[in-house]
Structure formats: structure tokens, C-alpha cells
Amino acid sequence: MSRLAFILFSLISTTLAGIGIVVALVTGNDTLQPILIAAAIGFVLSVPVTWIVAKQLA
């Protein structure tokens, strides 16, 4: 399951970080710090999401 989780993590983390960046930009936060914070939040949220998805697939 770990190989599946690593593959899923690479896809899920980039997707959630990208969603966070888009949300930050749409809300008018167009400086570096809010964009990095949004990307970091998406990256951190991707860990439990990956765990749940990998558990359901395996």
C-alpha cells in the first residue's frame, strides 16, 4: 500500500496546493506570503486525504 500511497500523494498534494493557490489569488491575496501559506496548507491537508484514498483503494 505504501507504493500506492506515494503515487497518490504526488497527485493529491499538487492538486490541493494548486487549489489553495487559486483560492488565495481569487480572494485578492496576491503577495508571496499568502500564496505560500495556501500552498503549505494544501500540502499538509494532502497527507490525511492520501491516507484515506489509499486505504479505500487497497
Image: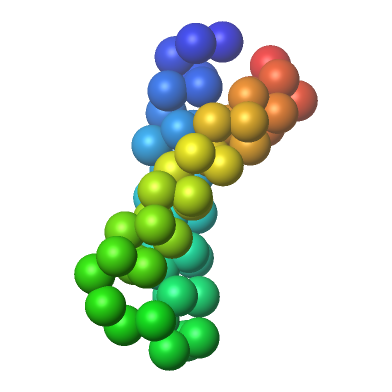
Q: Position of residue 47 (x, y in %)?
A: 54, 31
- Which sits in the foreground, 44 or 57? 44
Residue at left offset 49%, top offset 33%: 8
Q: Residue 24: x percent and y percent? A: 45, 75
- Relative horizontal placement of residue 52, taking residue 28 as reference (left or right): right
Q: How many marks?
A: 0
Residue 7 position (above or below residue 40) = above
Q: Is residue 50 left or right of residue 44?
A: right
Q: In what quadrant of the picture does the N terminus appear? A: top right
Can the viewer see residue 53 in this picture? yes
Percent across and percent down for residue 21 are 40, 68
User: Where residue 30 sits: x, y (%)?
Assistant: 31, 82
The residue furthest left is: 32
Question: For the C terminus, which image quadrant?
Answer: top right
Of the pair 42 and 13, the residue shown nearer to us? 42
The answer to whether 36 is drawn above or below residue 26 in the figure is above
For residue 17, what is the image quadrant?
bottom left
Could you tell me which residue is drawn at 50 percent across and 75 percent down?
Answer: 23
